[in-house]
Image: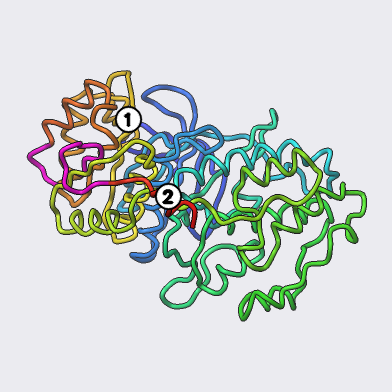
Amino acid sequence: MSEQVIDGRWEPVELIGTGGGGRVWRVIDRLRGGEAALKLVRTTSSAHRARVRREIAALQMLRIPGVVQLIDVGEHLGEPYIVMELLDGTPFPGTDARMSWTELREPTLRLLEVLANVHATGIIHRDLKPANVLVDRAGRVVLLDFGLARGTPGDSSVTRDGALIGTPRYLAPEQFLGRRVDPRADLFALGVMLYDALAGSAPMDAVSMASRLTTAHTMVVPPLSETAPEVPAGVARVIQALLAPMPGERPGSAADTRRALLDEGGAPEVREPLPLLAVHDALELVVAEALAGRDVHVAAEPGVGRTRFANELALRLLAAGRSALVTRAGVRPLSSLRALVPDSVMAAGPTGVEDSLRARLGGGATLVLDGKEQLDPWSRKVVERLGDCGRLIVIGDATASIRLSPFSAEALRT
C-alpha cells in the first residue's frame, strides 16, 4: 500500500490510524497538491458495506462547518475508500485530564452548535464519543465517522443478530433496548462525555450500565453536584438532564441545551423535537414509487421543510439499499452536483459529470432534485439530459399530484 498511488491521484505517505474497520493514511494529492486523509475500508459483510455507503451519503449531505469534509470516494483492490480533509486535533474535549467547566465551556458550546446543524438536516450521529469529535489547536470542533448515522423515523440501534451498534459506554438506554432513536440519543452521549471530563469518572457504574440492557428506569447516575461540586449548579443541572434515562426527560434539542449552558441558570426546557412538517404519507408514497424505479414529481408549499424532506427521503432510500444522490442549491458552475461525484470527475467538466451520474443511475441510484430552480445553470442542463435515465425525484414541481403541505393550525396545537 505504501508504494501504490491510488487511482493515479492519492499517494500514501504515512499510516495514521488502524482498527477493525480498516486503515487511515495520510496521503498526498498528486492532482491538486496538498494532503488529505484516506480511509481504506475492509468490508466483511453486506451490512458493513451499507455502513460505508451510509457514511458517504451523510458526508455528502453535511457540507457544513464542523463536519469533516468529503473530498473523494472510490475503490481500491475491490474495497471502498473515502478521502477526507486531514485534521490535526485531539479527541474531545481536547485533553485526557479532568477539566473545569471554564476550560470545557467553549468546546462544548461549539460542539452543540455543530450538532444542532447536523440534526436540522434530519441526521443523527448515533456513535458520538471523544474519538469521533476532534478539537484542533484553534479550538475548532469537528465531527467524524458518520458510518452509523441515520434519519430519525423508526430507527433502531440493534443489528439483525442483536449486536449493539455503537460504543456501549456512550449509548443511550433506548439504543440498548433497540427502540426508536432521535437526536436526544446524541445528547445523552454528550452528557456522558461532559460528565467524564468534569468528574474524572464515568457517570454509570457496572450496575447502571447493565440496567440499560433491560430497562431505562433503574439507571442511576450519581449527581454531578456531588462528584464535581465545583461545577456551577446550573451547568450540573443541564448535564444531569442530558443523562436522563428516558428521552422525554432530556432537553428537546442541541440548540436548547446550548442556550441553557450559555445561561447557566437552570435546566433546559424539556419538549418533544419538532416533527417533520411534510405529510408522512407523502414520504412513504415517494419512497415506494422510487423503489419501483419510477420518476416522481412532488409539489412543495412554502414552509414545509423541503430540504429536510429531501434528506429524509435519501436516508429512507439508503436504508432500503438504494443509493440516493441529493442536489444542492448553487450558483457556480456544477456546484449543485459537486457533492455527488469525485473531484477527478468534476475536473472533467459537464460531460464527465453527466457520464458519472448516468452510470450511477443505471446502477440503481436515485437522483433527488431539491428544487430544480435552485440548481446552477450548468447543473440544470446536466440534469435535463439525464431525464431519459429514469430514477429522478423532483421536489418543487408545482404541477405534481403528490403534494407536501405544512401542518394545519389545528394540528400544530395538538
Instruction: Point out the image quarter for the N terminus.
Output: top left
Residue stretch in magenta: 387-403
Q: Earlier in the sequence, mark 1 or mark 2?
A: 2
What is the residue that sits farthest to the top in this orientation?
332
From the top left corner, tell me how far across and down residue 151 is, in percent.
Answer: 43, 54
From the top left corner, tell me how far across and down residue 363 is, in percent.
Answer: 17, 50
The residue sitting at 47% across, 35% down in the picture is 69
From the top left corner, tell me how far across and down residue 250 is, in percent.
Answer: 66, 58
Per the rendering, the mark at residue 55 is 2
From the top left corner, tell me how far across and down residue 66 is, in percent.
Answer: 56, 36
Per the model, the C-alpha gap separating discs 1 and 2 is 17 Å
What is the residue that sits farthest to the left in this orientation?
388
Q: Is residue 253 above or below residue 62?
A: below
The residue sitting at 73% across, 74% down in the picture is 208
Q: Nearer the viewer, residue 337 or 56?
A: 337
Per the rendering, the mark at residue 338 is 1
Q: Amino acid at mark 1?
A: Arg
The residue sitting at 37% across, 50% down in the picture is 312
**Colour pattern of the rendering:** rainbow
Q: Residues within 10 Å of mark 2 (few under 14, many from 20)?
A: many
Secondary element at image label 2: helix
The quarter of the picture where residue 262 lies is top right
Is 46 situated left or right of 95 in this image?
left
Secondary element at image label 1: helix
Residue 245, magenta (yes or no)? no
| Labels 1 and 2 touching (C-beta < 8 A) | no
The residue sitting at 41% across, 75% down in the picture is 160
The quarter of the picture where residue 227 lies is bottom right
Is 126 situated left or right of 356 in this image?
right
